[in-house]
Structures are given as C-alpha cells and as structure tokens.
Amino acid sequence: MTAGSTPYRAVMVDLTRPQTPDPYPLLPAVPSFDVVSDDIADGRPLKDDQVASRGNTSPHLRWSNVPEGTASFTITCFDPDAPTPSGFWHWVLVDLPADVREIPAGFATGDLPAGAFHVRNDGGQAGFLGAAPPEGDQPHRYFFVVHAVGAGSLGAEADATPAAVSFALAFQTLGRAIVHGTFQH
C-alpha cells in the first residue's frame, strides 16, 4: 500500500458501526507520564502533515516525567477505528534510547539512534504511515503513544508484527504517555 492509498476504493459499502473503545484502558494498568506535540492537539483533527496523502510526516513529540527504571522507549501510532477486527498500526518505533525525550517532526524518515528500529506498519512500510481512513467513514482516532520500557531492548526483531510488539509491551511497559488526533475524509 502506498502513502495515501486505500485498497478497494471501487467498492462502496456502508461502514456504519459503533466506535471502537479506546484500547489503552483495556491493557494492564501502568502509570501515565507527560507527552506534548507541536503537531497534535489532543483530541483534535490532525494537521495535513500527518495525513498520508498530504504530508505523510511523523509528528513532533516531547515527553517528560518518565517512570524510574525506564531503559528505552517504544513509540506507536494506532488507529482502533479502522474497519478491521484488529485496527491499523501506522507506526512502530522500537528500542529508542532512554536518554531521548523529544523527536522532531519527520523523525521516522531520518537516521535513528543506535539500536532503534522500525517494525513494518500495517501498510507494509518500515516507518510512519499517515492517516488514511476510507472515504466516507466515521472520524478515526490516531493514538500516538510513548511507552516507557524497563529494558534497554524490548526483545523484538525488525521482522516482528506490530501486534507482536504490542504483546511484548504488555509485559515490559512501565508507563505510557498518550496524545491522539483524529481524521476523516
């Protein structure tokens, strides 16, 4: 899938369905910490830069007050509102060093710190894939999450699936910082 493409556009179906719950309260409880973004206003529509067909740029994120014992970070972007049983992973960045507390916009396409790597998103790309909900669908939520991990490495391989990374995070996350934006065509 290319940036901005949605497969099967030629077939129009009624996508009306209940909104999926926020997935993070359904996971094992961990403390929260602070995250802010120059690009995302929590709960508000995403800027064009974060839309696949317009800018396809990963957002700026800055976090603080991380839990003691944090040894690395994993950053994810998840859309629970995709019309699939499993949502849609837009970004999975693993093993970001513990001394990193801010990433600039476009970080996903630049050089990563030693040891950090991308897992392929659900579009098949190693990196960030911007918002691309089906046209006419309800507004989608994009949860950008910084996971504080208690080990220097999550233990995931570069060919892991986003779901496998999420599973590993359930056992190694010390805290989560969440900011989310929305988008609708």
Image (spheres, rainbow, N blue to C red):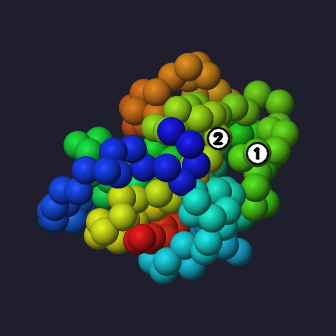
- Left or right of 18: which side holds 148? right
User: Does residue 182 show up?
Assistant: yes
Q: Residues within 10 Å of mark 2 (few under 14, many from 20)?
A: many
> Does residue 138 lie above or below 90 as drawn?
below
Instruction: Kindly identify the residue that appears in the image at 31 percent across and 58 percent down.
Output: 81
Give percent across and percent down for residue 64. Answer: 68, 64
Q: Secondary structure at mark 1?
A: helix
- Left or right of 18: which side holds 86? right
Question: What is the tally of numbered marks visible in this picture?
Answer: 2
Task: Name the disc covering residue 35, or none.
Answer: none
Locate residue 177: give its quadrant: bottom right
Q: Secondary structure at mark 2?
A: loop
Q: Nearer the viewer, residue 57 or 9?
A: 9
Tell me, yes or no, whether the two marked residues, 1 and 2, touch with CB atoms within 8 Å.
yes
**Which residue is tagged 2?**
127
Instruction: Kindly identify the residue that appears in the image at 39 percent across and 44 percent down.
Output: 7
Q: Nearer the viewer, residue 80 or 149?
A: 80
**Which residue is tagged 1?**
109
> Does residue 58 lie above or below 139 as drawn?
above
Give percent across and percent down for residue 96. Answer: 71, 40
Give percent across and percent down for residue 172. Answer: 49, 35
